[in-house]
Every structure is written in structure tokens, then in C-alpha cells.
Amino acid sequence: MLTCGDCGRTYDDGADAPWRCDCGHALDYADQPLPADDNPPETLDRDRGLWAFDAFLDTERAVTLGEGWTPLVDAPEWDVRFKLESVSPTGSFKDRGAALTVSRAAELGVDRVVEDSSGNAGLAIATYAARAGIDAEIYVPVDVRPGKLRALERTGAAVERVEGTRGDVTDACIEVVETGEGWYASHAWNPTFFRGTATVALELAAQRDWTVPDAVVTPLGHGTLLLGAYRGFRALREAGWVDDLPTLLGAQATGAAPIAAALADGPDEGDGDTPPNAAADGIQISDPARGDQLLAAIRATGGDAVAVGPDATEREHDRLARAGFHVEPTCATATAALAEFRERGVVAPDDDVVVALTGTGLKG
């Protein structure tokens, strides 16, 4: 059953289910809990990847490329640990959601999926669809990074390049969805995708002997990872497997920072003297599909979000590479934001912090 958290409407879950509520709000499944009467498992079969948590996922494993169990490594120069989502099968955390979403599509007998993306989510959906033998059509900006475009085309997906803003790309994709010519495998709207990204929280807790860090920092566009992490950490606490929720902190790009602006009760921080941060192409989202849910998650954990400009992104991108982390510029907004969170006192000097490095820099 799909439910709308805004107006309360419910819909049967199936191949013909709407991709959003009649009121325009995103739909979700009822929370899938972890077993509250069991202790955390002493061991997990990591060879099964994120499917080691299949009781939580509630989706049949139809397609997998070994996603999940990304490394958690020390980063002493930043005094944090990095969760290396950049080493996922297609090079981004989006593989977590794509594995679940395409598996769900296969479960429903879907023969064609469509998605809109700046590159990473589209590549993940196209790759898993190819693995499952499902046709894919991916809508991307006309200026998508060449490496991402080439990778997309090699999957055999139909790739449609759209002029205009990132919002125009979504609009073009939705026009096709509304004709009934494809199942919307959206990383922003499809609730199954968030079951997949929630596994980052389950993994982090397991990798830390069922404890959570004081804070988690992620890049923030549509907020697929941050909101998924929130749902995963909440499920862990409700089951009694962990005691606390970490503070969730988001890094947005100047010129596309609606969550940071809402939290600060002011305009987008890119509207002043700081230019828009075009380098952080992965988070160029001015109107996130689940903005209200993101704000609620951040506020529920005492979190925050800031807008990071292009100069800080470039400096941190170079610094990460010199330390051995070859990631895309969007990732650098997270470590740049960390410095500002520390300056603001949101992150204390002795806090235990995890930063998600969300995408590889090897796609060009």
C-alpha cells in the first residue's frame, strides 16, 4: 500500500500505481520496521551486499551487481571517517536505490523504465535495467558530463538530452510518464529507491558495532541519501538496535540551495555575491521532490544545511584528490560544508563524524 503523508490518500501498489499523489505530494510505503524483538545480528552475510538486510527491504532480489558494504575509512586530515559510496558498481550511492527499484520493476513485470537525472542516477537505473533485461529511457541535461553520457549510451538505454534547467529535464521525462509509455523509476519520487538508500544507515551501524556517529554529512540535492539515511537510522532506533539518531547535515550548491535557505529563513545563499556553483552538477536541484520531508528529517535530528560556493568546492576537490580520494566535485561540497559546520559550532571538535563521498571522479 502506498500512502501520502500530506493528504492521507492511499493507493494500491502495483505497476499501474501513480508515481505521485493526486495532491502532488510524494508517496511512500508504510515504514518497514526491523524486528524489535530481536537483537542486532552478530554476523551478516556481506557477500549478499545490501540484500543482507532483505527483511527490511521487503523486495525480492531480482537484480544485483554486488552493491552495498562500501568501505568506511579513516580520513585524519578531516578528522572524520569517509563512507566510500564512490566505489559502488556504477560509481555512486545511487546503486543502492537502483538495485531495489529495478528489482521492484522486475517483480511487477515492468518492461520499460524511465528516469531523469544529471547522470549518476540515470546511469545506475540504466545499468541495473540492462542487467535485468528491461528497456530504459533516461533524460539528462544537454550539458551532462561526457563521461557519464558515454557510460549511459553503452548500457543500450535510450538517452534523451534536454535543453534548459535540471527542472526542464524532469518535466520532459514526466511528460512521457504521463502518457503511460514507461514506469517512473525516479530516484526522487519512487518510494522503493529510498528503501535502498536507507541501507547506508544499516551498514554504518553494523560497521561500527551497532553504534551511530554523532553526525553524518552528505551532499544534498533531491536528498535521496540523506532522507534514506534518516529512515534507516530511525528504523534502527525503533528496533532498539541503536540508542540515538545522528545529526544529519546537508551540503547544497550556491544557486540551488532551497533547503539551506528554508532552514536559515532567508533567500538562496547563491543569490548574493557568491556565484552559482555549477561544478556541483549532481545537486543542482532548486525544487526537491521531497523538500518537506528533508526539512523534517534535518530538524528531527538537530541538523542543518549550508550552501557551498564554487571556490570552496574546487579547493576541496583538489584536496581530496591529493589525499587519494578521486571523487566528483559534488562530493567536495560535503567536506567544504563540514568546515562551515565546525565554524558554526554545529559540529563540535570532538564529535564522531562520517562524511559520505557519494560519486566517483573517474566518469569524466
Image: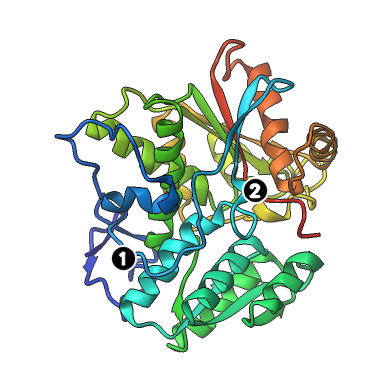
Give the residue at x 60% y 50%.
Answer: 221
Tell me the element at label 2: helix
Tell me the element at label 1: loop
**Mark drawn on residue 71:** none
- Residue 310 lies, in percent from the top left, at 82, 42
Quarter holding residue 16:
bottom left
Q: Is residue 300 above or below residue 342?
A: below
- Most extreme residue toward the top, as rendered? 350
**Residue matched to label 2:** 86
Frontmost residue, 278 versus 33: 33
Q: Is residue 235 above or below residue 24?
A: above
Spatial CA distance of label 1 from label 2 is: 25 Å
Dot 2, how many residues are within 10 Å of its Cα: few (below 14), some (14-19), or many (20+)? Answer: many
- Is 31 situated left or right of 290 in this image? left
- Is 193 situated left or right of 53 in this image? right
- Residue 297 lies, in percent from the top left, at 42, 38
Frontmost residue, 141 versus 8: 141
Give the residue at x 42% y 88%.
Answer: 180
| Residue 15 in view here | no
- Residue 23 lies, in percent from the top left, at 34, 66
Quarter holding residue 165:
bottom right
- Is 241 situated left or right of 259 in this image? left
**Mark drawn on residue 60:** 1
- Residue 25 lies, in percent from the top left, at 38, 61
- Amino acid type shown at disc 1: Glu
Sequence-wise first label, 1 or 2:
1
| Residue 328 in view here | yes
- Amino acid type shown at disc 2: Ser
